């Protein structure tokens, strides 16, 4: 994809910062749009479906956290990357941003070279698997479609923010395997992203509330795993298992 085909939405209530963002990103050939608050950002995003949103946290009318949360509830933004602008030392803001589905952040004051470098890096990582094969995993009444970002439990569709879905998808990729916290952080948030110690725990807690506690197990001091029980086997494996049991019972 050419830079001119990549849509970036910059959101900040400070005109000077918006001007800096637009000037430097436009010079790289990106298609740049702007908004002055979260409410306007959501409105514009629905019209253009940007590849990347760079958004301030503290804004009038609707802040960046609220805007990101709304966007992550809409499936059309499953592939949209959200990068926040934050003041140095705002640990609470960083944690809140990741909890609602942010992918990265840039500290203020914005340094154009660092900003452009981060944008190029995060866009490059997102292109590594631009065309994923349709992949569906099913364990009994639980089904996850990675291609469509869909999760079903008892045939009921459950909407998940991007990071929650990616975390669930990672755990489901190797059921009963314990994923260390460091590996989860690397795979879901990226090697260079620094998040709070409890970020993974918060996301797991939310998944347990939405999908069911029985699917997840905490390995204290290590990490988490997705649990497969007999009732949770993929149907074809479960049926084969029962058939073998029956055959052996006849001998």
Image (spheres, rainbow, N blue to C red):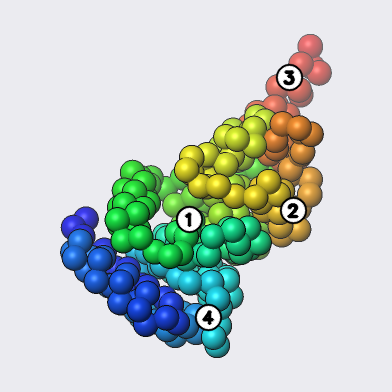
Left or right: 104, with 155 as reference point: left
Q: Quadrant of the C terminus?
A: top right
Q: Where does label 2 land, which residue?
A: 205
Residue beneath label 1, please?
Answer: 104
Q: Specify whether 94 is left or right of 141.
A: left
The residue that label 4 is drawn on is: 59
Nearest to the observer: residue 245 or residue 134: 134
| Farthest-out residue, bottom | 61
Please rate how many residues cluster around mark 2, counting C-alpha atoms within 10 Å: few if below 14, some from 14 to 19, many from 20. Answer: some
Front residue of 169/91: it is 91
Give above or below for 233 relative to 79: above
Q: Residue at x 25, y 66 (%)?
A: 24
Q: CA distance from mark 4 to mark 1?
A: 18 Å
In this rendering, the label closer to the viewer, 2 or 1: 1
Closer to the camera: disc 4 or disc 3?
A: 4
Question: Which residue appears at 36% of the width and 46% of the height?
Answer: 125
Residue 219 point in image, percent of width and height = 76, 33
Q: Earlier in the sequence, mark 3 or mark 2?
A: 2
Q: Which mark is residue 200?
A: none
Residue at 53%, 72% (x, y): give it. Answer: 57
Q: CA distance from mark 1 to mark 3?
A: 55 Å
**First reached walking from the N terminus: tag 4 or tag 1:** 4
How far apart are labels 2 and 4 at the CA level? 29 Å
Q: Could you tell me residue 207's position as x and y percent?
A: 69, 54
Reading the image, the residue beneath label 3 is 247
Name which of mark 2 and mark 1 comes first in the sequence.
1
Task: Identify whether 233 is placed above or below 95.
Answer: above
């Amino acid at each position: 994809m050419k830079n001119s085909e990549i849509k970036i939405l910059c959101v900040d209530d400070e005109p000077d910062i918006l001007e800096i963002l637009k000037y430097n990103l436009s010079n790289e050939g990106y298609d740049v749009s702007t908004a002055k608050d979260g409410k306007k950002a959501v409105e514009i995003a629905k019209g253009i479906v940007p590849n990347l949103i760079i958004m301030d946290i503290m804004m009038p009318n609707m802040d960046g956290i609220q805007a990101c949360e709304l966007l992550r509830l809409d499936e059309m933004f499953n592939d949209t990357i959200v990068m926040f602008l934050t003041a140095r030392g705002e640990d609470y803001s960083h944690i809140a941003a990741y909890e609602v589905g942010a992918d990265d952040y840039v500290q203020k004051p914005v340094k154009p070279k660092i900003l452009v470098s981060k944008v190029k890096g995060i866009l490059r990582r997102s292109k590594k698997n631009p065309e994923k094969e349709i992949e569906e995993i099913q364990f009994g009444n639980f089904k996850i479609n990675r291609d469509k970002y869909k999760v079903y439990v008892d045939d009921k569709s459950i909407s998940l923010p991007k990071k929650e879905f990616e975390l669930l998808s990672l755990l489901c990729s190797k059921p009963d395997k314990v994923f260390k916290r460091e590996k989860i952080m690397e795979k879901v948030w990226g090697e260079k992203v620094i998040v709070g110690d409890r970020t993974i725990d918060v996301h797991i807690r939310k998944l347990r509330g939405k999908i069911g506690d029985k699917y997840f197990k905490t390995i204290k001091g290590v990490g988490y795993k997705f649990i497969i029980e007999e009732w949770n086997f993929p149907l074809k494996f479960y049926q084969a298992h029962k058939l073998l049991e029956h055959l052996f019972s006849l001998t």
